Amino acid sequence: MSTTINSSSDLRMAEIAEKVEHGERLTLEDGVYLYESDDLLTIGQMADKVNQRKNGKKVYFVQNMSLYFTNVCEEHCAFCHFRRDEGEAGAYTLTPDQMLEYVAQHYHPEMREFHISQGHNPHVPFEYYVDSLRTLKQHYPNVTIKAHTAAEIEFFSRLSGLSYKEVLQTLMEAGLETLPGGGAEILSDRYRKKMLLKDKASTQEWLDVHRTAHQLGMKTHATMLYGAVETLQERIEHMMLLRELQDETNGFLVFIPNSVQPASVNAGIKRRVPAFDELKTMAISRLMLDNFPHIKAYFINIGIKLTQLSFSFGASDAHGTIIQERISHAAGAQSPEGVTRDELVWLIKGAGRIPVERDTFYNEIKVY
């Protein structure tokens, strides 16, 4: 066995390392034990081994742009500082033409993905969301549209009276090609009862939307929003629910662990998820989600330097250029709102890894 066990590690850690060495699946108890351990370097070492088996030293990124059609939302999630009520100061709902004006200011020919995140706005009909995608696709046919979390799809189903399948098929006909992973938060009924309104997608509804998308041939993304009121066991159970669905459908492209942001960019260190926890979560995600191709280090939430370090803790994706991120920054993120391609290449090379520009579906565009 080549994995090094630090002197502070015990027999239990050695048993887990043996499993990792032989490609055996980790259990709930294994995952909780790793979270309770302070042996970060051994956990990271194991995650790096697993990642390099899958991806070598390659780290992927995409040239993308985040778009936000509306911040009006019927939900009142405890962690969200992006949403507004209709008529509230700062509330907005853009028309498709207004969004086209915004895109035109930032678009360049190498842009490969529009990542659309927004509120659950009940004051416009489902057709508004369909028309928004259709307009974007008509004007930018070569750009992949990644839009609408599973929670949004569940909301659209209630708004329109259509089934998940019918909602997805309607959006796919308009140009939708993949779902982002948001709305998952923590897939625990206890957590969701405490942190979300009852109308937001339940654990089973979130999973059912992605299952339906996978059955329609769509590849999707998965996230976990951690660092609030969830237990360590709930984090591992969240990963295991995703792992079970991936066993069933093989429809997930990547897992993105996102730490909760405080309400203000000036919030002190006590209000933020510790870097130790962020790196440990990255590594444990890689170890638990053995059937996921990629784990993403989302620099918006964990910062540039910690993203760079994450490539030695199991991460194989650096997200993308983004242009102007709003949701995490509305909640106090201290990272830049976007980065350039050259900065991403520098970031990855600086970690001793190989930068690979990709499209949404991890087809390689250029190896740097």
Image (cartoon, helix red, strand yellow):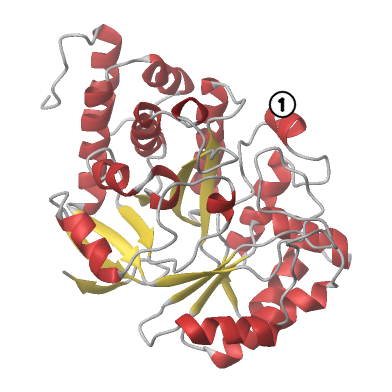
Residue beneath disc 1: 190
Query: Residue 119: in sight, yes or no?
Result: yes
Secondary structure under badge 1?
A: helix
Image point (71%, 54%), residue name? 83
Horizontal and vertical percent position of residue 251: 51, 57
- Tell me: 304 left or right of 285: left
Indicate the position of residue 172 as horizontal and vertical percent values: 64, 76
Residue 22 visible, this orientation: no
| Residue farthest toward the bottom in the current orientation of the protein | 139
Q: Quadrant of the N terminus?
A: top left
Q: Could you say which is closer to the camera, residue 24 or residue 299?
A: 299
Q: Residue 121 appears in which quarter of the rendering?
A: bottom right
Residue 30, given in percent of the width and then of the height, sits at 40, 20
Please give the name of the residue rendered at 60% of the width and 91% of the height, measured from the top-left corner: 138
The residue nearer to you, when weighing 34 against 71, is: 71
Residue at image position (51%, 61%) is 325
Q: Residues within 10 Å of mark 1 (few under 14, many from 20)?
A: few
- In this rendering, is residue 277 above or below 201? above
| Residue type pointed to by label 1 | Arg
In the image, is 174 to the left or to the right of 234? right
Which quarter of the figure is the C terminus placed in? bottom left
At 60% from the left edge and 67% from the top edge, which residue is drawn? 147
73 left or right of 13? right
327 lies above or below 265: below
Rendered image quadrant of residue 150: bottom right
Residue 241: % across, % down: 57, 37
In front here: 3 or 35?
Answer: 35
